[in-house]
Amino acid sequence: MNKLIKSLCLVLFPLTAMAKGIDDSGQLIVVTSRNWDDIQATAQRYERHGKTFEKFEAPFAVVLGKNGMGWGKGLLDPGQPQGPVKQEGDGKAPAGVFSLGTAFGYNNSADTRLPYLPLTTAIECVDDSQSTHYNQLLDGTSVAKDWNSSEHMHRTDELYRQGIFIQHNTPATPAAGSCIFFHIWRGPSAPTRGCTAMDPADIARLLQWLDPKKSPLLVQLPEAQYEQLRRRWNLPTR
């Protein structure tokens, strides 16, 4: 197995033993928006100290999907949630709790402890839900193509110069949403197609801070839903 294929496998499997819930994690990235439709949100990092989480450094701004958020397929079951449910192509960022996959970028290496995938012009993320490779990053020249739609990751802009694969809908359920990342934003008022984007300096800090040995998680919810689930999911006070 060559080095590239080994890197790609890290997208599909946990970085370490996967956190089953908040209690198994030592690092949280908490993203909250004012409501389901809001395209702007705030991210706050937390670190575990004993049985509690404490805020780490200052919060920072992020942007969400052009249609806000919808319940995604993550690690924790919200029960019978009220609100929209994410689907393929709906322009919504996923709400819920998610583990993180590999980091990626245009450079050959990055200042991060996460597994890192250098993006070449052959790397694609498959968003065709009929494909056996749905919601996977892969080298399009190394596998038999069974998809009609994908995103080429080495773009002509800066959006994916640094990014992290968010393990939403992993393993993949058809049409439930795919190719969700942290990545660089176009600007503080420019939404994404479903990812969570931020200033280049903030994503660089995330890459430096995240430690796969601490089973980091993304918690992403509108404010009201965060408060409703905070005690049940043992989330930190915002």
Image (cartoon, rainbow, N blue to C red):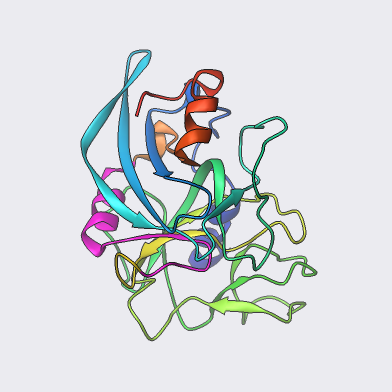
Residue 75 as seen in the image, left or right of residue 226: right
Q: Give the range drawn in magenta.
A: 190-210
Residue 112 as seen in the image, left or right of residue 38: left
Q: Camera-side residue: 211 or 66? A: 66
Which residue lies at the image location 66% right of the left edge and 50% below the top edge?
A: 84
Quadrant of image for the N terminus: bottom right
Q: In the rendered image of this protein, does residue 107 appear above or below residue 82?
A: below
Residue 150 as seen in the image, left or right of residue 193: right
Residue 201 shown in magenta:
yes
How far across and down, in percent of the image, does residue 185 sit?
34, 67
Q: In which quarter of the image is residue 109?
A: bottom left
Q: In the rendered image of this protein, does residue 78 appear above or below residue 232?
A: below
Residue furthest to the bottom in view is 156
Residue 71 shown in magenta:
no
Residue 55 as seen in the image, left or right of residue 222: left
Residue furthest to the right in view is 130
Q: In which quarter of the image is residue 91?
A: bottom right
Q: In the rendered image of this protein, does residue 183 appear above or below residue 221?
A: below
Q: Camera-side residue: 136 or 66? A: 66
How far across and down, in percent of the image, does residue 59 sit?
25, 42
Number of labels in the image equals 0
Which residue lies at the image location 54% right of the left edge and 26% below the top edge?
A: 229
Q: Camera-side residue: 211 or 109? A: 211
Q: Camera-side residue: 120 or 223? A: 223
How far across and down, in percent of the image, does residue 218 sit?
45, 41
Which residue lies at the image location 56% right of the left edge and 51% below the top edge?
A: 94
Q: In the rendered image of this protein, does residue 164 appear above or below residue 123?
A: above
How far across and down, in percent of the image, does residue 143 sit?
69, 75
Q: In which quarter of the image is residue 57?
A: top left
Residue furthest to the top in view is 51
Quadrant of image for the C terminus: top left
Which residue lies at the image location 28% right of the left edge and 61% below the top edge?
A: 110
